[in-house]
Amino acid sequence: MDIEANTIIGAFLRSARRREQLTQSDLATLLNKPQSYVSKIESGERSLHVSELFDYSNALNISPEDLVAAMRVYLDK
């Protein structure tokens, strides 16, 4: 995955987190990760592994299928 895709996916995940009214720290706690992990994902500095996608979907109360579909829409813009 390239940097542009990581940035787009990170922006989508930031938007989804905000819709759930979670801070980066709140989400990090749900993911059992440091806040810097969430920050790096949202900035596009780091990409998600497939297993992490499932963790994100659970934490954001969205099915993995819906999360991937929404990311696809974001990537196609």
Image (tube, helix red, strand yellow):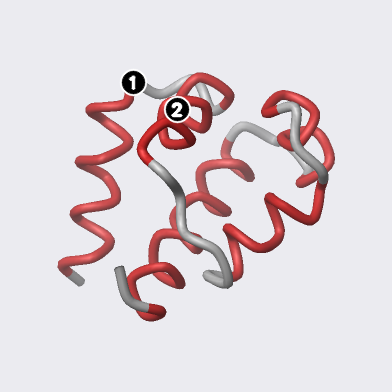
Q: Is residue 28 above or below residue 63?
A: below
How crowded is the residue under tag 2: few (<14 C-alpha within 10 Å), some, or many (20+)? some
Q: Nearer the viewer, residue 52 or 27?
A: 52
**Residue highlighted by disc 2:** 57
Residue 48 x/y as whole percent? 45, 50
Give the quadrant of residue 2. Answer: bottom left
**Residue highlighted by disc 1:** 63
Mark 2: secondary structure? helix
Q: Is residue 49 above or below residue 39?
A: above
Residue type, mark 2 in image: Ser
Numbered marks: total: 2
33 sits left or right of 40 in the view = right
63 sits left or right of 15 in the view = left
Residue 69 x/y as whole percent? 20, 41
How crowded is the residue under tag 1: few (<14 C-alpha within 10 Å), some, or many (20+)? some
Task: Identify the residue at horizontal 50%, vertical 19% (top origin).
Answer: 58
Residue type, mark 1 in image: Ser
Give the quadrant of residue 57. Answer: top left
Q: Nearer the viewer, residue 33 or 21?
A: 33
Residue 42 x/y as whole percent? 59, 60
Q: What's the CA distance linking mark 1 and mark 2?
A: 6 Å
Task: Identify the residue at horizontal 23%, vertical 65% (top origin).
Answer: 75
Residue lying farthest to the left in this orientation: 76
Say whether marks 1 and 2 touch (CB < 8 Å).
Answer: yes
User: Considering the image in quadrants, where does the N terminus appear?
Assistant: bottom left
Residue 28 x/y as whole percent? 75, 37
Mark 1: secondary structure? loop
Task: Identify the residue at horizontal 58%, vertical 24% (top origin).
Answer: 59
Give the quadrant of residue 9. Answer: bottom left
First reached walking from the N terminus: tag 1 or tag 2: 2
Q: Give residue 41's mark.
A: none
